[in-house]
Image (cartoon, coloured by chain):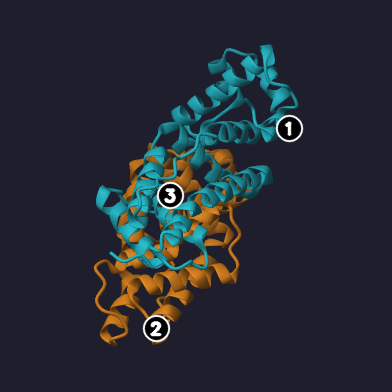
Chain colours: A orange, B cyan
Amino acid sequence: MASTSERALTQKRPGGRSARVRAAVLKATLEELVAVGYGLLTIEGVAERAGVHKTTIYRRWGDRETLVLEAMLERGSREVPIPDTGSLRQDLLEYGRAVLASSMEPEVEAVVRAVAAIGDSDPRVAEAARTFWRTRFALASRMIERATERGEIPPPPDAALIAEMVIAPIYFRMLVSRERMDSEFMERVADLAAEVAGAQR
Amino acid sequence: MASTSERALTQKRPGGRSARVRAAVLKATLEELVAVGYGLLTIEGVAERAGVHKTTIYRRWGDRETLVLEAMLERGSREVPIPDTGSLRQDLLEYGRAVLASSMEPEVEAVVRAVAAIGDSDPRVAEAARTFWRTRFALASRMIERATERGEIPPPPDAALIAEMVIAPIYFRMLVSRERMDSEFMERVADLAAEVAGAQR
């Protein structure tokens, strides 16, 4: 089930012992990220948790960044559903709620924090994150396109940016301002994004 | 010049050798964050760069989180100016540009990434970030209040959230999606935030 990019990274075909080791190591990487965070993550710690020798990990992944990158690709392959309620404001609200709920899952949160910490020290991580979010916003743009098709709003110049407006405050609060996110917050953000898109209240 | 919260953390009054050590260590912490990132930051590395013995740092700061917290408070005390151009859209654009430029300074970027990585493992860091951003958004709300006072827009229900809409995408792209931020991006974000606030194009 590995994606092309994942396969290119490990250069192993799925199935057999190799795949079992890979699955165990990536699972252990996520668990270690949740348990100790990226700052204290070590290949030794992951090896111990996965029940493999640390040289296995060093040989196959080489460094922490590659481990976190693969764990990120693996975890990120689960998609957030795109709602279709017949109202743009409601679609944006349900989408925001789903992304917020997903971002609060310990494994997702740990991966996001690790990616934020890695910065530009590993360009593959940045590239993978970019591709992931472009795909996600392209999917989310369907909410805005459907609203245009049913005549709820005029075609907006940049549908993806409207989806980004719903998502950005969630991660800003989680990673930067640490401000609380209650249900009223998500309602307000969805209201503003729907207004921007031209929807009537 | 240390703020009350900084003084409470170190329990030393400013001035003298103690203050010089503190300044050298916090400067070295920022430099180490830029050089190696939070993941590889060690108290030993900071001590070497600051030219102090590592036991000095352990005794006074105790752990990495406290060091990063103090460095953050120190660096964060420099304020981004709040523009007053006579047009809300222009104010939001210039404000966004100033925050974007600030976020790209290596020391600021390194601190933001470290804070994102620390997560909830240190509640003092979360609390300091929350206070910092509440203060910043309260200051930024003046742009929206001035626009209301000059009759450009009706009073919006939540001025701080409009400022947050300008800022959140900057940090979302920097930390999460790694999407490029060109001048058109900032223009579009300022347009959308001004529209939300009720300003006419």
Say what amino acid the circle numbered 2 marks: Asp
> What is the distance, in whole Å, between disc 3 and disc 2 at their CAs?
29 Å
Label 2 sits on a secondary structure element that is loop
Q: Which residue is mark 1?
A: B8
Which residue appears at 28% of the width and 64% of the height? B201
Tell me the chain of label 1.
Answer: B
Say what amino acid the circle numbered 3 marks: Tyr
**Vertical comparison of A87 with A96: above or below:** below
Query: Are the residues tagged 3 and 2 within 8 Å (C-beta)?
Result: no
Q: Which residue is mark 3?
A: B171
Number of on-image labels: 3
Q: Which residue is mark 2?
A: A84
Task: Name the quarter where the N terminus of chain B is drawn.
Answer: top right
Tell me the chain of label 2.
Answer: A
- Label 3 environment density (alpha carbons within 10 Å; few <14, some 14–19, many ≥20): many
- Return the residue nearer the eye: B39 or A26: B39
Which residue appears at 58% of the width and 39% of the height? A40
In the rendered image, residues at marks 1 and 2 fall on the same chain:
no
Relative horizontal placement of residue A136, taking residue B20 as reference (left or right):
left
Label 3 sits on a secondary structure element that is helix
**Vertical comparison of B120 with B15: above or below:** below
